[in-house]
Image (cartoon, rainbow, N blue to C red):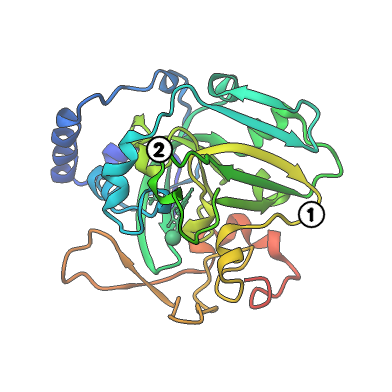
Amino acid sequence: MPFKSDLRWSEVTPKSLFFNRRQIMAGAAGALVSPILAGRAAAAGFSTDEAPNTLEEISTYNNYYEFGYSKEEPSTKAQALTIDPWSVEIGGMVDKPGTYDLSDVLAGMTIEERIYRFRCVEAWSMVIPWQGFELSGLLNKVGVQPSAKFVAFETLYRPEEMPGQQGGSFPYPYVEGVRLDEAMNPLTILATGLYDEELPKQNGAPLRLVVPWKYGFKSIKAIVKITLTDVMPPTTWNILAANEYGFYANVNPGVDHPRWSQASERPIGGGLFAGRKDTVLFNGYGEQVASLYAGQDLTVDY
Ligand SMILES: Nc1nc2c(c(=O)[nH]1)N[C@H]1C(S)=C(S)[C@@H](COP(=O)(O)O)O[C@H]1N2
Ligand SMILES: [Mo]
């Protein structure tokens, strides 16, 4: 039974972890309850009933190369990032292009909790209780033109606050993209929060993509630009190593990374002696998304 309609993180988190989390929250300076949560609606059957990782795990084990290559650096270094004011340039094949203030992006969007499995291409995984809204809601608001086939995303480029962007060989800004039908799938969200709090900066505040059936690198952080286009957009990891990271990046235990197996994964926080678990096609979301790839060879379109 992977899906339940009405579970909240507080119900699926073991009590001990819950209290632990409360203590962490109490100690977190400046943790503000997001006003947009007032409009929260129940997630209609999209959340897993698996126990989420702790806030500490989710916010201290990160991939965010703009703040360093290690898992630990983003949780401290990202705190220097200015996320208010924030605007998102939405353009390309849309009826209402423009530079939208974050509050205009959020206007009319329904913020929901979505407890999703999250699988990194490096073969670790977590369960994360996001708050966010369906990307389709925003795309419908700006009006997608019939010619559009893909949605491209870009992360903030601000080297003075993102030390990883100062020099080096990594091509910034980080860019990502999905096909329009993938973008419109109700599982695809723009996340604004975690555990009923504002999204930590290291997790991509104030706005990051979450596509739970794809490897984590698709879930681009700190989005400042969204472009509707009719050509498959470039994506950062594909630019870096096309034979290792494809455009689709669907979680698939049957298609190994050239340098390691994708057949299993290491759940973060499982403890020293916790075993690996088998990775599931489309990260377990096949019922919702397998039809998007009917007729495609997933070993070619990896
Ligand atoms: N801008 C940006 N977005 C990014 C990354 C990054 O380095 N820069 N890393 C990606 C990778 S590889 C993963 S696994 C996830 C990690 O998200 P998390 O730190 O919230 O778990 O973010 C993705 N989004
Ligand atoms: Mo990743």
Q: Nearer the viewer, residue 250 or 277?
A: 250
Going by the numbered disc 1, the residue's amino acid type is Val
Estimate the x, y position of residue 138 in percent, counting from the top left.
Answer: 64, 31
Estimate the x, y position of residue 192 in percent, counting from the top left.
Answer: 45, 33
**Considering the numbered disc 2 on the image, is that residue within a helix, a strand or a loop?**
loop
Q: Who's the residue at 45% across and 25% down the image?
A: 40
**Considering the numbered disc 1 on the image, is that residue within a helix, a strand or a loop?**
loop
In the rendered structure, find residue 231 and report the number of the disc placed on it.
1
- How dense is the environment of label 1, judged by Cα within 10 Å: few (below 14), some, or many (20 and up)? few
Residue underneath mark 2: 161
Task: Classify the position of the N terminus by image quarter.
Answer: bottom left
- How dense is the environment of label 2, judged by Cα within 10 Å: few (below 14), some, or many (20 and up)? some
Residue placed furthest toward the front: 167
Evaluate whether residue 249 shows in this view: no
Q: Is residue 278 above or below residue 145?
A: below
2 or 1: mark nearer the eye: 2
- In the figure, residue 249 lies in which quadrant? bottom right
Q: Is residue 40 above or below residue 139?
A: above
Name the side, left or right, on which 80 lies relative to 205: left
In the rendered structure, find residue 122 and report the number of the disc placed on it.
none
Evaluate whether residue 288 shows in this view: yes
Estimate the x, y position of residue 293 in percent, counting from the top left.
Answer: 70, 64
Q: Who's the residue at 81% across and 45% down the image?
A: 148
CB atoms of marks 2 and 1 within 8 Å: no
- In the figure, residue 189 lies in which quadrant? top right
Task: Classify the position of the C terminus by image quarter.
Answer: bottom right
Q: CA distance from mark 2 to mark 1?
A: 32 Å
Of the numbered discs 2 and 1, the one sitting upstream in the chain is: 2
Going by the numbered disc 2, the residue's amino acid type is Glu
